[in-house]
Image: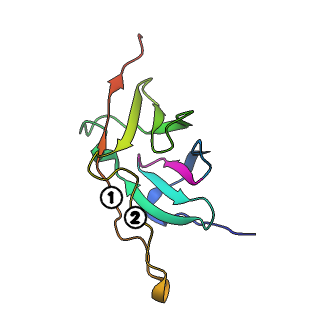
Amino acid sequence: MTQWVPPETSGLITHAAFSCDSQSIYVSFEDGSVGILTASSLRLRCRVTSTSYLPTNPNSRVYPLVVAAHPTEPNQFALGLTDGGVVVLEPLESEGKWGTSPPTENGAGPSSLTAGATSTTDQAQR
């Protein structure tokens, strides 16, 4: 059995989902960040910080409650936010996929801890 322990700085896991091709796992956290793991080894491929997709508002504590993987695009997923908003994330076109596979020598971690994303936000009617 393989186990993944999130960094203490991320807070609690709010949700997780497999990508449609079952190659990645998208994990959302209370601090607003999202981790993209390689499903077979549970290695962190990259981390998307909340500042990549949320507007900066110190009076608002918005974070993802749910992750939904796109049914046919393995590198695209949506986050359902605590304020009713929905954000769709995908890697930058120049990247093509989330992060790069980490080097295996010396147990080194991921090559990049943050990733750019394009996003759209739809606010729910209140």
Q: Quadrant of the C terminus?
A: top left
The magenta stretch spans which residues? 23-32
55 relative position to 89: left or right: left
Image quadrant in which you'd find residue 119 = top left
Looking at the picture, tell me which residue is in the foreground, 45 or 56: 45
52 relative position to 65: left or right: left
Q: Amino acid at mark 1?
A: Thr
What residue is disc 1 on?
114
Q: Amino acid at mark 2?
A: Thr
Q: Quadrant of the N terminus?
A: bottom right
Looking at the picture, tell me which residue is in the foreground, 24 or 2: 24
Looking at the picture, tell me which residue is in the foreground, 5 or 74: 74
Decide whether residue 53 is among the magenta residues: no
Q: Secondary structure at mark 1?
A: loop
Label ID, residue 100? 2
Label ID, residue 72? none
Of tags 1 and 2, which is closer to the observer? 2
The picture places residue 98, in percent across and down from the top left corner, at 40, 54
Q: In the image, what residue occupies the spot 53% across and 50% down?
A: 27
Vertical relation: 70 (above or below) 75: above
Please identify the residue farthest to the top as the structure is shown: 125
Q: What secondary structure is the stretch in magenta mostly built from?
A: strand
Vertical relation: 102 (above or below) 72: below
Looking at the picture, tell me which residue is in the foreground, 54 or 114: 114
Q: In the image, what residue occupies the spot 32% across and 28% down?
A: 120
Image quadrant in which you'd find residue 5 = bottom right
Decide whether residue 30 is among the magenta residues: yes
Label whose residue precedes the other's in the sequence (1 or 2):
2
Q: In the image, what residue occupies the spot 40% across and 33% down?
A: 88
